[in-house]
Image: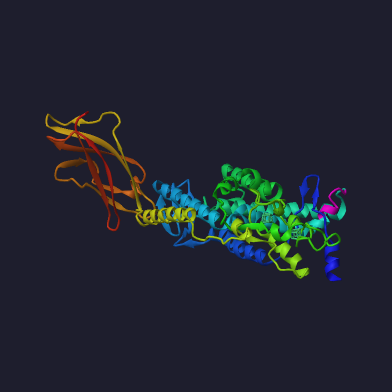
């Protein structure tokens, strides 16, 4: 009786005027998604408030032209390391795409996490998907109007918190909050915050799945990365077809009772039974929904499940395969390069420019000189006295400030001249040393003795 009631309760897909209402479901994969997304949200909203020795734990400061990564100050010249970090992240995504499809999209991508958050707020304020679809064409008045206003206000609040936190990774969050509470935020910060709030509200509240469908390049990449052994959410057509609802089912019918629940819970509005689609973000909501149906019908779960094409065709899934090994090797190399790069960063940032006016000058008949401009910056707030010298000190003579006091000359270009007597080379490399009591770094440039 209970099973029949469940099947008869079959609800239509909640689509009205091209807009669909996503039904929230429960199940092991939704629990897993929460297990992944709550810690990520806690890290995003919390990290920005944590300080170490009075410094933010993570800050990308355009104003101060420096990066603070978990207490380590990096200069703007270390930006390629961040690019390396992003490239490593991209290879990690490629590796995961080959192995387990788009689980990143379904379980950890900010677009998905914020969409689920906004969906939850919508359900709390305006009711379930069924209720929302039922009243879609009703005029908005009274209680419904209040609920709608409450939804949009909560969305705006959530978007504002997101924008504030995100901006806090580029400017100290305490300064932003203090500026906002005293209405003294700089205009550019106010405009930026308003734009970020609007974008978050639009993305997670209104545009949602359209970003995944039309704007995200990753969904396009994945189509070429998937192979027959990639695990992805799939419908077992061999088991489910021919689909038939309970009233029309006969001995030849498959396990799919065509209840449509897998479609109603899909945040991108697709039918997984149509096969692998670029719009599927592997969130596994349809897996949980279908498992509930199978459980109520006393049939084995897994009609919709994570499975490879090979597995669905009855073959064995190959875990180790050339494509996966290839991405794994590139990923390991990228990781090693980034770790090496971070291990070799210096607290001093040095830039040397050759004089563009003249390739070289003559001090006298036998002495050739090159002019340089040197800029030394400390990437943290310590006051340092830097000694400047040349590695090739015996042969070359250095003219210019032998010491740089960073408290007075930080980030200013200083003139230097290097001279050599009777050079027997057209050009050579020249290394400047910059040393203080506890930091040292070198910078190599070119010395030209002739114009050839
Ligand atoms: S088809 Fe299933 S796994 Fe794919 S996006 Fe829709 S609900 Fe998520
Ligand atoms: S695949 Fe499962 S959830 Fe989807 S229609 Fe068939 S029985 Fe229902």
Magenta-drawn stretch contains 369: no
Question: Looking at the image, which residue is at 71% across and 47% down?
Answer: 206
The reply, left or right, for residue 332 in relation to residue 261 is left
Residue 57 seen in render: yes
Question: Residue 16's spot in the image, x, y percent?
Answer: 81, 48
Q: How many circles with numbers are drawn on the protein?
A: 0
Image: 330 above or below 46: above
Depth check, front residue: 146 or 247: 247
Task: Locate the N terminus by quadrant.
Answer: bottom right
The reply, left or right, for residue 245 in relation to residue 201 is right
The reply, left or right, for residue 149 in relation to residue 164 is right
Q: Which residues are magenta?
A: 132-138
Magenta-drawn stretch contains 137: yes
Depth check, front residue: 36 or 363: 36
Question: Residue 346's spot in the image, x, y percent?
Answer: 34, 53
Depth check, front residue: 281 or 130: 281
Quadrant of residue 235 in the image? Answer: bottom right
Question: Residue 182's spot in the image, x, y percent?
Answer: 61, 51
């Amino acid at each position: 009786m209970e099973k029949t009631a469940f099947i008869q309760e079959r609800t239509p897909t909640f689509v009205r005027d091209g807009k669909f209402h996503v039904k929230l479901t429960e199940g092991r994969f939704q629990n897993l998604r929460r297990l992944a997304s709550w810690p990520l949200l806690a890290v995003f909203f919390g990290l920005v408030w944590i300080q170490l020795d009075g410094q933010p734990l993570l800050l990308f400061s355009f104003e101060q032209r420096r990066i603070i990564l978990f207490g380590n100050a990096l200069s703007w010249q270390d930006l390629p390391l961040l690019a390396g970090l992003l490239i490593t992240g991209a290879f990690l995504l490629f590796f995961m795409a080959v192995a387990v499809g788009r689980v990143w999209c379904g379980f950890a991508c900010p677009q998905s996490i914020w969409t689920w958050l906004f969906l939850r707020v919508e359900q709390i304020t305006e009711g379930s998907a069924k209720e929302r679809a039922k009243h879609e064409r009703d005029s908005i008045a009274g209680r419904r109007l209040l609920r709608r206003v409450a939804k949009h206000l909560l969305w705006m609040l959530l978007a504002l918190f997101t924008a504030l936190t995100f901006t806090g990774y580029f400017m100290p969050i305490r300064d932003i909050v203090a500026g906002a509470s005293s209405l003294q935020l700089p205009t550019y910060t106010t405009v930026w915050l308003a734009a970020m709030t609007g974008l978050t509200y639009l993305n997670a509240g209104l545009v949602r799945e359209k970003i995944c469908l039309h704007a995200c390049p990753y969904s396009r990449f994945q189509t070429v990365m998937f192979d027959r052994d990639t695990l992805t959410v799939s419908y077992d057509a061999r088991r489910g077809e021919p689909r038939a609802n309970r009233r029309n089912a006969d001995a030849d019918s498959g396990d799919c009772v065509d209840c449509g629940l897998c479609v109603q819970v899909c945040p991108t509005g697709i039918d997984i039974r149509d096969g692998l689609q670029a719009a599927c973000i592997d969130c596994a909501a349809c897996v949980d929904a279908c498992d509930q149906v199978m459980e109520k019908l006393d049939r084995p779960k897994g009609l919709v499940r994570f499975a490879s094409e090979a597995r669905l065709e009855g073959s064995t899934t190959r875990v180790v395969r050339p494509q996966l090994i290839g991405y794994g090797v590139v990923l390991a190399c990228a990781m090693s390069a980034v770790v090496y790069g971070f291990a070799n960063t210096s607290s001093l940032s040095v830039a040397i420019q050759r004089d563009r006016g003249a390739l070289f000058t003559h001090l006298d008949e036998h002495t050739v000189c090159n002019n340089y401009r040197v800029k030394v910056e400390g990437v943290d707030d310590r006051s340092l006295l830097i000694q400047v010298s040349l590695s090739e000190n015996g042969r070359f003579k250095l003219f210019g400030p032998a010491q740089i006091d960073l408290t007075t000359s930080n980030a200013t270009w200083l003139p230097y001249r290097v001279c050599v007597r009777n050079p027997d080379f057209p050009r050579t490399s020249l290394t400047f040393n910059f040393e203080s009591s506890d930091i040292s770094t070198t910078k190599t440039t070119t010395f030209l003795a002739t114009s050839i």
